[in-house]
Amino acid sequence: MCGIVGYIGSGQAAPILLEGLARLEYRGYDSAGLAVRDGEHDVEIVKAKGRLKVLSEMTDGGRALRGDCGIGHTRWATHGEPSTENAHPHCSDDRAVVAVHNGIIENYMELREKLIKNGYSFYSQTDTEVAAKLIDYYYKKYRGGPMEALARSMMRIRGSYALAVMFRDCPNEIFATRRDSPMIIGVADGASYLASDVPAILKHTRSVYYVDNLEIARLNRSSVRFCTVDQEAIEKRPVEITWDAESAEKGGFEHFMMKEIHEQPRAVQDTINSLVRGEQIDLSGAGLTDEALRAVRQVHVVACGSAYHAGVAMQYGIEDLARVPVRVDVASEFRYRRPILREGELVVIISQSGETADSLAALREAKAQGADTLAVVNVVGSTIAREADHVLYTCAGPEIAVATTKAYSAQLVVGYLLAIRLALARGTLEPEAGARMLAELRSLPEKIARILEDKERIQWFAAKFSNAKHAFFIGRGLDYAVGLEGSLKMKEISYIHSGAYAAGELKHGTISLIEERTLVVGVLTQDPLFEKMISNMVECKSRGAYLMGLTSYGNYNVEDTADFTVYIPRTDPHFTPSLAVIPLQLMGYYLSVSKGLDVDKPRNLAKSVTVE
Ligand code: F6R
């Protein structure tokens, strides 16, 4: 996603802008540019395709650009290929208006036509040039000043934007506005800053204003004023930023969640390594010898939230491979429904924290009934780990973001290992097949890393749907389990209502909710169920749904049905949740980021729910 930085003060603007843009590099970009002006002199614009380094070299680290007022941008192409022409800033032909933009203007073609009719021509393929020229058009037509020109443009533009604009007639000011794309303003002694995100300006100030949707900010060297689109003044208080953007803890990522998403290859690998000796899955350290596993007649998996979703996946794996019946329960239900537990039944409690109140109570209930209990836990020495009869640790490391990612992935892996060992012990899986599966399991970290390399596609898609009100996730079998987790990721951090459904269930009620442009994410990694999934997706499409297909490479005919397709590497069908969940985590993450939400600490949620 694009990055924006602005500065007006007494220092030289360009080096400050370049440094700010560098702090936003993690957002991904393909070109960059600066617009700087020196008092009454005309604005100078420098743009370059490629890394910021190129722009920096062209301007001698910014020192070659004189002026104490400017805006900068890193662009990630949406409209028009990555090129110098398409790079921001964009301007009207006489440079009366210069702008940088983050977001997607949906009706830019219509606005472009209107402007062409009014004598404008275009040098780029971008929606941003349209925005700059639209502002210029209203500025000159009504002569009501920058605020009015911005307000009129905002009324006409559909879609998302964070805009920073300089007007030739206002040499000592920068204007900014936003809708559904983040924008913050920072104030320091004798200088004002703007940026799409805090890290860009944190070196200079910790006093930050969050611009709300459809607000306009007017920055000069000593103050910032805010007003509504109706030009009514708004009183805003700055927020004091207490965290350190450069904190090594986040490893250069903007959020812990993104850092943790990237730690998944390692979490998966470490978890596999912890339970494999030589070429054998070995759970005997937890007291789960083959003899003990052969005695298991029924498995109950009990957990909450994402851990429950890992449990649903575990159910499919164990039943299919080991042919042992599995029942999965939400812990808050299990603990009160007077579960019937018999000898030879194993109760598996899955919990990242090992402290979740309902899961702990479920464990105690199971133990009170004399069941054998196994904890799958991330936090070593936690209460659930201490109280269970057996413990298998996930090796995800500390998870800080409230929304779990790497711990969930590690839980999936423990589920696979348990299913395979159980199946080998019971003779429902041949040793050669088991060895092949283990080898495939070992390839998952590399495959996850490969998916992460292509995250910009998801970022683009998320930006497009950040205004969505509802979404549906559909799948069959293990793909249903993944849908549950994808849906929760979307809900909890982007606040978009979403539901996950077994695809065959849709026509029993839910399909009545599908209307024009409703986002439906179809997960189809299970080849035997592929055609059936396609039929369910077609049912949604014929009712107007916008379809995202998530499938394995090779299933290219999904594109006949889906509007947007994400591919994951092929793997054993039992392991596809580990790959399919990655784009869905990214989608939740980018939706949250594009809405300017607190990704790592979503409202109303706690990392560990230790109360009922
Ligand atoms: C969602 C999430 C929660 C937890 C749930 C159980 O992203 O993190 O749904 O999975 O609260 O927590 P643990 O695993 O600590 O028992």
Image: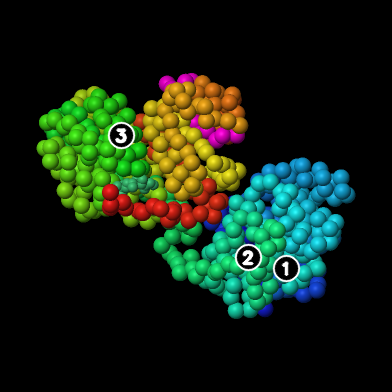
| Residue 462 image position (x, y, % from top left) | 56, 44
Amino acid type at mark 3 = Met
Kindly identify which residue carries mark 2. 234
Magenta range: 517-532
Sequence-wise first label, 1 or 3? 1
Of residues 567 and 227, the one nearer the viewer is 227
Q: Residue at x 58, y 45 (%)?
A: 467
Above or below 336: residue 21: below
Above or below 265: residue 45: below
Kindly identify which residue carries mark 1. 36
Q: Is residue 568 magenta?
A: no
Q: Residue at x 56, y 34 (%)?
A: 518
Q: Is residue 227 left or right of residue 554?
A: right
Sequence-wise first label, 2 or 3? 2
Kindly identify which residue carries mark 3. 314
Q: Is residue 68 left or right of residue 249?
A: right
Q: Quarter-wise, where is residue 514 in the image?
A: top right
Mark 1 Cβ and ligand 1 under 8 Å apart: no
Mark 2 touches mark 3? (CB < 8 Å): no
Q: Is residue 542 left or right of residue 480?
A: right
Q: Please tell me how crowded label 3 is: few (under 14), some (14-19), or many (20+) other residues with Cα within 10 Å.
A: many
One can see residue 451 in this view:
no
